[in-house]
Amino acid sequence: MSSPMLGFSDEDKDGTIQPHNDALVITLRIGGYDVKRVLVDQGSAVEIMYPDLYKGLNLKPEDLAAYDSPLVSFDGKTVTPKSQIRLPIQIDLDIMEVNFIVVDAYSPYTAIVARPWLHTLRAVSFTLHQKVKYPSEGQVKEIIGDQAMA
């Protein structure tokens, strides 16, 4: 079975404030909770979780696995992550396991989902249109960004 064509048109901009330079910020169901302020970052190779989400999900140190590969943050500084954890992200009926790197740093976001998540979902994101589109059950589904949160 072939996947439906994923694309964007001017109609996809309906409901957005144009012109804008906003990041794509969405709400995702992570670990069984609706998590707001999740940044979709096509330029990142790893999913990141910040302290607010770690605390909000009531995760314990024993839930985490070691991770010691340094990361480079947005401002070019090297950040040494604490650990990683594998958690489910649910979109409609689709559930996928994602490895989040837990970083002890300030961020306006609770988490960042990146290329591994987009590729697993077979999704396309577009900041201009403030949407993520992905194929599911023979149709195109979408996650709409929250410009006010961005």
Image (spheres, grey):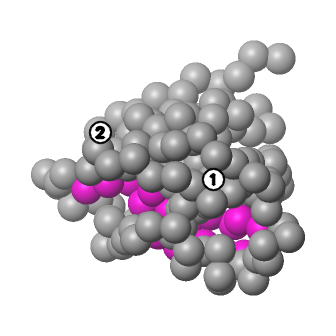
Q: Is residue 53 left or right of residue 33?
A: left
Q: How many marks?
A: 2
Quadrant of the snapshot with the C terminus = bottom left
Q: Is residue 84 left or right of residue 11?
A: right
Asked if the residue under mark 1 is in contact with the one under mark 2, i.e. CB atoms within 8 Å, the reply is no
Label 1 neighbour load within 10 Å: few <14, some 14-19, many 20+: many
The residue segment tinted magenta is: 22-39
- Magenta-span inclusion, residue 118: no
- Mark-to-mark CA distance, 2 and 1: 36 Å
Say what amino acid the circle numbered 2 marks.
Answer: Asp
Residue wearing tag 1: 101
Q: Residue at x 69, y 66 (%)?
A: 29
Task: Give the x, y percent position of residue 59.
Answer: 76, 76
Task: Give the x, y percent position of residue 39.
Answer: 45, 56
Q: Earlier in the sequence, mark 2 or mark 1?
A: 2
Q: Residue at x 74, y 39 (%)?
A: 136
Residue at the extreme left: 19
Quadrant of the snapshot with the N terminus = top right
Residue wearing tag 2: 10
Q: Residue at x 71, y 22 (%)?
A: 3
Report the front residue among 63 and 32: 63
The label shown at residue 121 is none
Residue at the extreme top: 2
Report the front residue among 78 and 113: 78
Label 1 sits on a secondary structure element that is: strand
Magenta span main SS: strand
